[in-house]
Image (tube, grey):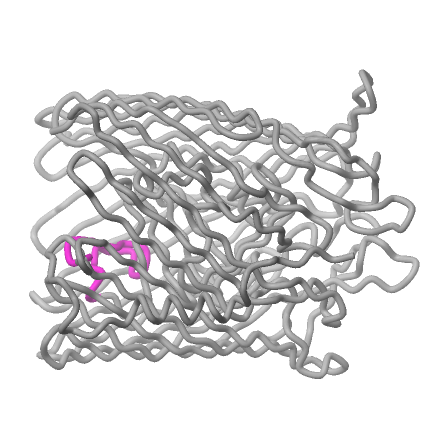
Amino acid sequence: MQHRSSVAPSSHLLALAIALGLPSMAQAEIAADATDLDKVVVTGTRTEVAIEDSLVPAQVIDREEIERTQARSLPELLRGRAGINLSNQGGPGKLTSVFMRGADSEHVLVLVDGVRIGSATAGLASFQDLPVDQIERIEIIRGPRSSLYGSEAIGGVIQIFTRKGGIGFAPHFRIGAGSHNLREASAGFSNRGERGWISAEGAYNRTDGINACRGSGTLFQGCYTDEPDLDGYRNVSVSLRAGMDLTDALTVEGHFLNAEADNEYDSSSFGGNEAENLQRVAGGKLTWTASERVKLALQAGRADDQSDAYYRTGATRSFVNTFETRRDTAALQGDFTLTDAQVLTAGADWQQDQITSSTGFMVTERSNNAAYLEYQGRFGVHQLQASVRHDDNEQFGGHATYGAGWGMSFGKGFRLNASYGTGFKAPSFNDLYYPGSESPGLQPEQSRSFNLGITQYVDDWNWTFNVFETRIDDLIVFVYPPPDYLGIGTNLDEARIRGAEFTVGFKLAGFDVATQLSHIDPRNHSAGYDDKLLARRARNTARIDLDRSFGDFRVGLTGNGASHRYDDLANMTRLAGYGTLDLRLEYAFHPDWTLQARATNVFDRQYETIAWYNQPGREYGLSLRYQPGP
């Protein structure tokens, strides 16, 4: 029987979010620190742009916000953000899919310090294994960016920047403990001199976990096995980032991130119940500022994604399979300032994917070459952006994508934005060649999207409202005709996704308030599906963050809500909506020392984002942080 949440319907939480997010101007208490005007994004255009000047919807999560929310994983940090839906297979460290604007989880491009990551076999990034302790900031771009990045960027782009220190020598560390025998620790330092800088970080996280799956081997449901045990998780990570100004015009920098995870889960002897996972990203960049008008950058990187699965029964552990992806990339980009208000960017990208697996694939490597051109200009109150890219894929040939944006400012921080973009996604190696479900005839998915938005960024508050529509042709899904349990890939005729997003940030009665609301209508327009909703997307999501300081104390809460979703293409398995509430407390008993406490899902709501897979109930955590002030 399906678990149902005992909270009020998610529409009530949405109503609460609207009530909190839309106060009258007369009631709002003005505060300069509620603004995002000092934030800059580079992901949306591959150049630096102030967030209030971005013609595509963008959001920045900085280190201060990461520490304030006390999020202990990247999925926890992203939950409820505008345009984002999550599904998870049973708690911390378990496979987590991120859906942006109703598009598939494989339609999200993920970058780490400019290097494209993700599994070429599974087709998605391992969000659950990317350590939040190593992250300096995250940029989220909602909507297609294939005209700048190529394959995968249909729903949006998420770029993660590893930690990079400020001026002088700055050490820090953190220790913590919590429910389910959670124990964690992190430490690092940064040092910046006149010409060079370095940052080094290390982190450890371990938990006994929860029972990930309530499946049944007899009924052949869920994870197809009966394993009512705790499924633990361990993550050990290190990162290094360094750079030097060789001359006033020439800068070199490098970065390295290595995260090794041990994950226990529930599955049969065919899928294993333990995994050793590796996420490794390394890269370097050389930047030459030839003049005030010309800037050239050469970047290269490698991303490794590896998973070794085992099956344990008692003291016996047997090998099941291994999947390893190596993704090498290189990019050359030139930014040319034509006038003070016009910039032309030209670049070339190269990518090669290679897999090594105990499972035999018909094809094990492919390459992609691309060139792109982008123009950005400002003419009085008008702002323009246009980009075009051509990808030459070794398997699928040439593919052109386009993007265009227009914005108009009309006083008091208001601006109207409109953008259009096309996108595509090349099938993954699993889509095409996984033994038993081979579908070598699959074609790349193609999309076209339109966005219309209005924003206001002023010194005291900011808000954004966007409506959009995305149409995806040849959408790849897997069908399971009996007795085929692996599935056969097929290109659907079309999917149509419409939606709206609202965000607002301000200060009210001493509280910092941030509200994010999202609505999507992701419809399957293919023959035989009769406008069914695409699987595992909640139509409505909401997130509210409230924080306030009282001298040395700081209190906060986060409310998350999601409406119902369906677990299958036929919309036969309905998962109930849910709402959760998290509380947090900080006490800065010394300028350099802070004690943090948190309680998540305080009402112990039971819910699922994937049928048969449990989610954590009420949890507690306590941590001590040392971080010298400036």
Residue 368 coordinates in the image, percent (x, y): 51, 53
User: Is residue 122 something one can see in this rendering?
Assistant: yes
In-front residue for pair 252/605: 605
Q: Quadrant of residue 193?
A: top left
| Magenta region includes residue 611 | no
In-front residue for pair 181/535: 181
User: Is residue 392 something one can see in this rendering?
Assistant: no
Residue 499 coordinates in the image, percent (x, y): 46, 76
- Classify residue 382 as left or right of residue 364: left
Q: Quadrant of residue 379?
A: bottom left
In-front residue for pair 75/16: 16
**Image: magenta residue range:** 36-53
Up-down relation of residue 419 to residue 303 (above or below): below
- Classify residue 115 as left or right of residue 461: right
Q: Quadrant of residue 299?
A: top left
Q: Residue at x 79, y 61 (%)?
A: 488
Q: Which is the main secondary structure of the residues drawn in magenta?
A: loop
Q: Quadrant of the N terminus?
A: bottom right
Residue 221 coordinates in the image, percent (x, y): 82, 51
Q: Residue at x 19, y 60 (%)?
A: 508
Q: Residue at x 27, y 49 (%)?
A: 547
- Classify residue 552 as left or right of residue 276: left
- Looking at the image, the residue that sits furthest to the top is 315
- Classify residue 39 as left or right of residue 443: left
Up-down relation of residue 567 to residue 558 (above or below): below
Up-down relation of residue 222 to residue 107 (above or below): above
